[in-house]
Image (tube, rainbow, N blue to C red):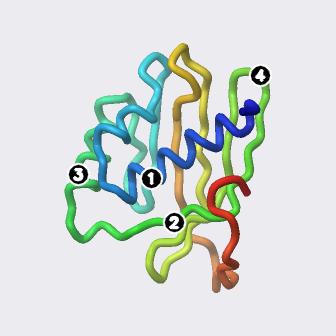
Amino acid sequence: MSTDEEVLATNLAFYAAFTDRDYDAMADVWASEADVACLHPGWPLLEGRDEVLDSWARILSNPSSPDVRCLNAKVRRVGEFAWVTCLEVLEDVQLAATNLFVREPAGWRMVHHQASPLPGRPPPVAEVDETWN
């Protein structure tokens, strides 16, 4: 597996944990050595692993949390730092997302997630390979 494929696999694991509402899998995706932050739509900036994972515990345990799909994921990388931009589709809402990753001894781990509503009317969602685009 190439380095870019490793990053995309970690990104996919993040969305699988979200969709499956699997807190342990979500915690595994996030960095344990590097500082982390998260900016959910409409939330204040969350900083630190405990605060970020607490937010995910609340989101994943909420039965009204929407299902999410990641489309058009594209990886960019500089050394031991990578980021993925993608489109998140949540029921009838589309968000632009950026996920930042660093390489830790356990592999690529997320250090930041930010999702924001798209301005104006979102483009139609094309069905594409959700894993490697």
For discs 3 and 2, the disc positioned in front in the rendered view? 2
Instruction: Give the mark nearer the N terminus: 3 vs 2.
Output: 3
Q: Which amino acid does the dot numbered 2 rest on?
A: Arg
For discs 1 and 3, the disc positioned in front in the rendered view? 1
Q: Is residue 123 left or right of residue 39?
A: right
The correct choice, above or below, for 103 with respect to 10 in the image is above
Disc sitting over residue 53 in the figure = none
Q: In the rendered structure, are the residues bearing label 1 and label 3 in contact, judged by CB atoms less than 8 Å apart?
A: no
Query: To which residue does mark 4 refer?
Result: 79
* Residue 125: % across, % down: 65, 79
Q: Which amino acid does the dot numbered 1 rest on?
A: Ala
Name the residue at 56% across, 39% down. Answer: 10
Query: To which residue does mark 3 refer?
Result: 58
Q: In the rendered structure, are the residues bearing label 4 and label 2 in contact, judged by CB atoms less than 8 Å apart?
A: no
Between the C-alphas of marks 1 and 4, the distance is 26 Å
Kindly give the residue lying farthest to the front in the view shown: 1
Residue 62: image quadrant is bottom left
* Residue 33: % across, % down: 46, 16
Q: Which amino acid does the dot numbered 3 rest on?
A: Arg
Between the C-alphas of marks 4 and 3, the distance is 34 Å
Residue 18: image quadrant is bottom left
Instruction: Give the mark nearer the N terminus: 1 vs 2.
Output: 1
For discs 1 and 4, the disc positioned in front in the rendered view? 1
Instruction: Give the mark nearer the N terminus: 4 vs 3.
Output: 3
Q: Nearer the viewer, residue 43 or 99?
A: 99
Which image quarter holds the N terminus?
Answer: top right
Query: To which residue does mark 2 refer?
Result: 69
* Residue 128: % across, % down: 70, 70
Label 2 crowding class (10 Å Cα cut-off): few <14, some 14-19, many 20+? Answer: some
Instruction: Find numbered disc 4 in the image and state the secondary structure of the residue it sits on.
Output: loop
Instruction: Find numbered disc 1 in the image and state the secondary structure of the residue it sits on.
Output: helix
Instruction: Give the mark nearer the N terminus: 1 vs 3.
Output: 1
